[in-house]
Image: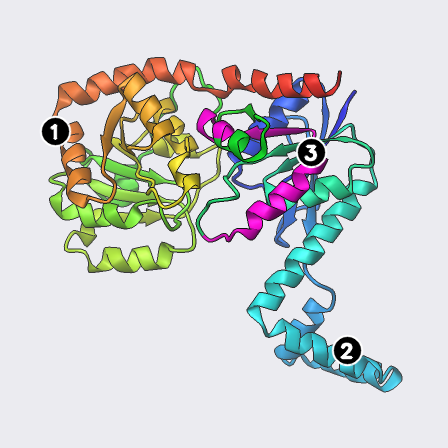
């Protein structure tokens, strides 16, 4: 049995793509160990029902817990600390330096990442693997340093050289580390072309399609939970509440949308700001927020929607070239979409005729599309019918063969 060490830089509680990949490899008789992060509330090791093992790594720096208790003036810790300092006075300057460093948010963030990388690498080096699989650039060093002769797969979910919140250093770092990589995977053909133009080698393409389900999940009773009328359309955005996703424009569009309740499901950096913007809207009674939900429950929420939004803004090449899993999740739940006019999204929406493309910078244009889908029953039903065919085409059961093909090639 071939052994795979896979890495992801999150707690693996809502990562659908990594779940699908680990499941596909386990089904193909690979032994898979998934190394991820621990937030302190999750088991350090567990066996997933799909047949792979999860190993969570704590990245808390040494003495962080002690320093936190000192800051809270915990009496037991203070007494124990005083005793240690009497016995080992040389600890005083060490503790002072650590205390000062911990007060800087930037330094704390750097320390957490450094210790996370080191511990993840050390944990993986205790085992022997045939293939190391790094999900995104922030786990590629771990895969390289713990490889011990294993082949390395770089599974890039984002365009590292041009994405929001990241400088040019990411691209330089990626270029340097690619020398150690045996095979690269990207999300779609547009990104494969871009990667080839940068580095001279075309990567494999693995689309981020959802698991196929023979039956569409029964809709969750969201109308009751939100306290709205049963005939009120639900206008859904599900996913990360982050910059550059057009979420402010959805709120700005609500005064022009004649019927429907806007629902955000998810969490992220701008959620508080978005909630403040919603509270200032004249249509604030028609805007609701729910926290992110477990992956196995999300399809029931999606199935309750009338319209799904994928209004990604063209703020960087990473967004411009995105396929977006939520687009396929909407189709899997038979939900028509209002979507950004970007190449990979346009290809699916126009080919399958399952929604309308809009200028995402225009709240009025978004509203026109929503009103059309909500108010024209024939159009909406035709779109829903076409999603039934599309969901059979854009699903993981068909796509996972690409991943297994990459692995078979590497094992020759």
Residue with the mark numbered 1: 375
Q: Callout 3 environment at 10 Å: few (<14), some (14 to 19), or many (20+)?
A: some
Say whether disc 3 or disc 2 marks the residue closer to the N-terminus. 2
Disc 1 crowd, CA 10 A, few/some/many (<14, 14-19, 20+): few
User: Mark 1 and mark 2: span between their CA atoms?
Assistant: 68 Å
In the depicted structure, whether residue 151 falls above or below residue 396:
below
Q: Identify the element where label 3 is drawn.
A: loop
Q: Is residue 148 magenta?
A: no
Q: Nearer the viewer, residue 111 or 297?
A: 111
Marks 1/3: CA distance? 52 Å
Which quarter of the rendered picture does the C terminus lie within? top right
The foreground one among 42 and 138 is 138
| Circle 1 or circle 3, nearest the eye | 3
Scheme of colours in the image: rainbow
Badge 1 element: helix
Residue 153 in sight here? yes
For label 3, the residue is: 181
Query: In this figure, which residue is indicated by the disc labeled 2?
Result: 94
Count up the numbered dots.
3
Q: Nearer the viewer, mark 1 or mark 2?
A: 2
Residue 59 visible to an observer of this rendering: no
The answer for how far apart the CA atoms under marks 3 and 2 are is: 39 Å
Residue most extreme to the right: 87
If you read the primary sequence from the N terminus, does the residue marked by circle 1 or circle 3 appear first? Answer: 3
Q: Split into 4 quadrants, where in the image is the N terminus?
A: top right
Judge from the rendering whether residue 145 lies leftward or rightward of residue 254; answer left or right: right
Magenta-colored span: 165-193
Image side of residue 388 versus residue 371, left or right: right
Q: Residue at x 53, y 24 (%)?
A: 206
Front residue of 140/353: it is 140
Q: Which residue is painted at 59% across and 47% down in the image?
A: 172
């Amino acid at each position: 049995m071939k052994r795979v060490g896979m890495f992801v830089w999150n707690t693996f509680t809502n990562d659908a793509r990594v779940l699908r990949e680990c499941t596909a490899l386990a089904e193909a008789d690979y032994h898979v160990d998934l190394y991820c992060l621990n937030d302190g509330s999750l088991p350090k090791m567990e066996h997933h029902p799909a047949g792979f093992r999860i190993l969570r790594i704590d990245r808390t720096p040494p003495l962080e817990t002690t320093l936190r208790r000192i800051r809270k003036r915990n009496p037991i810790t203070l007494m124990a600390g005083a005793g240690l300092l009497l016995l080992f006075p040389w600890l005083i300057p060490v503790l002072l330096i650590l205390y000062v460093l911990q007060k800087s948010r930037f330094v704390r963030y750097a320390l957490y990442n450094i210790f996370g990388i080191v511990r993840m690498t050390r944990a993986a080096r205790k085992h022997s693997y045939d293939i190391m699989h790094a999900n995104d650039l922030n786990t590629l060093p771990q895969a390289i340093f713990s490889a011990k002769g294993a082949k390395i797969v770089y599974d890039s979910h984002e365009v590292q050289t041009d994405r929001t919140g990241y400088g040019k250093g990411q691209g330089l770092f990626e270029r340097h580390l690619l020398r150690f990589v045996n095979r690269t995977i990207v999300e779609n053909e547009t990104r494969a072309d871009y990667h080839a133009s940068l580095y001279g080698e075309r990567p494999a393409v693995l689309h981020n399609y959802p698991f196929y389900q023979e039956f569409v999940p029964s809709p969750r009773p969201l109308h009751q939970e939100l306290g709205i009328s049963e005939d009120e359309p639900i206008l859904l955005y599900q996913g990360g509440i982050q910059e550059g996703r057009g979420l402010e424009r959805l709120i700005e569009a609500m005064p022009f949308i004649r019927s429907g309740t806007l629902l955000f499901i998810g969490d992220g950096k701008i959620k508080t700001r978005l909630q403040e913007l919603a509270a200032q809207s004249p249509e604030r009674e028609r805007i609701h927020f729910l926290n992110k939900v477990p992956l196995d429950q999300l399809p029931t929420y999606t199935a309750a929607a009338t319209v799904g939004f994928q209004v990604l803004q063209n703020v960087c090449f990473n967004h411009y070239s995105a396929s977006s899993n939520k687009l396929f999740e909407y189709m899997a739940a038979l939900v028509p979409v209002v979507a950004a006019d970007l190449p990979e999204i346009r290809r699916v929406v126009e080919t399958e005729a399952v929604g309308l493309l809009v200028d995402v910078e225009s709240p009025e244009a978004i509203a026109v599309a929503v009103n059309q889908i909500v108010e024209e029953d024939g159009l909406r039903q035709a779109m829903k019918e076409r999603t039934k065919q599309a969901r059979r085409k854009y699903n993981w059961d068909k796509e996972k063969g690409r991943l297994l093909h990459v692995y078979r090639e590497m094992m020759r």
